[in-house]
Amino acid sequence: MSVETTRDVACDCKAGRVAAAYGLDDLDDELERRWLGEGRERESLRSLADYANRRVLRSAMRDAGMEVIDGEVENTYRLLTDSDTSAGDRTQVERRLERAGVDVDAVESDFVSHQTVHTHLRECRDVSREEADRDRVESARRTIFSLQSRTEAVVEDSLSRLAGDELALDDVDAFVDIQVVCEACGRQQEVGALIDRGGCTCQLD
């Protein structure tokens, strides 16, 4: 059966209840990081559900006193959930868990679906990939335009230092125009327009 706990449940959805019941304090943050791709490749909701369920299984096995070796949880979870697993192999792993004191039926009932993970992230954690995408675009825009402004300032300063003896030049204003060439269609575009448009027109059409 699921492990009882007096820990306050952060939310009342299944994902929140299961995380609290199995003492998975960091699960919410980890699911969020994996979904948004913070410092790593983004993962699909199905991948996140499998990750959460393996954490549940690992916790149940350890609570039963099983010594969990590297790769054992992943293989056990695969045998329990993969449709390609033979009935004999599934029965064998279920019996092994039950002999160790794991309530397999209860653990499997605590497994979450990818829909449950999605609802938990969106409604309970208020996490949106769309919002994260917008933040990343704005961050990239600020970085590019900051470098553009800095380059303009460096050019103006360098020329002003040369004006007079080295260059016949008065005060100048420098303008840096960053052009991007799409390798797919060969079209040359100004970087700001490209960002505003959401990409190259050859990919958006």
Image (cartoon, grey):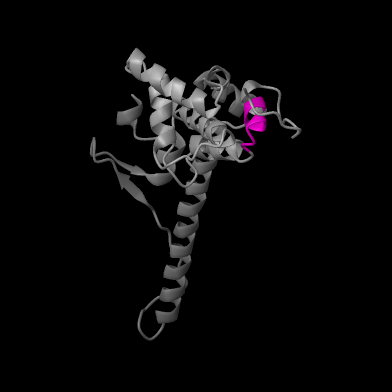
Residue that sits furthest to the bottom in the current view: 165
Tell me if residue 108 is in the magenta stretch.
Answer: no
Quadrant placement of the N terminus: top right
- 70 over 17 or under it: above or below: below
Q: Is residue 22 magenta?
A: yes
Give the residue at x 59% y 22%: 119
Count of numbered marks: 0
Location of residue 166 with respect to 83 vertically, above or below: below
In the image, 52: left or right of 200? right
Residue 78, image x and y in percent?
A: 39, 26
Q: Is residue 125 visible?
A: no
- Residue situated furthest top in the rendering: 87
Snapshot quadrant of residue 189: top left
Q: Quadrant of the C terminus?
A: top left
Nearer to me, 108 or 34: 108
Residue 144 point in image, percent of width and height: 45, 53
Residue at 64% across, 39% down: 25
Residue 64 lies, in percent from the top left, at: 57, 33
> Is residue 77 among what the camera can see?
yes
State left or right for residue 108 relative to residue 89: right
Chain part drawn in magenta: 17-24
Residue 190 lies left or right of residue 23; in this view the side is left
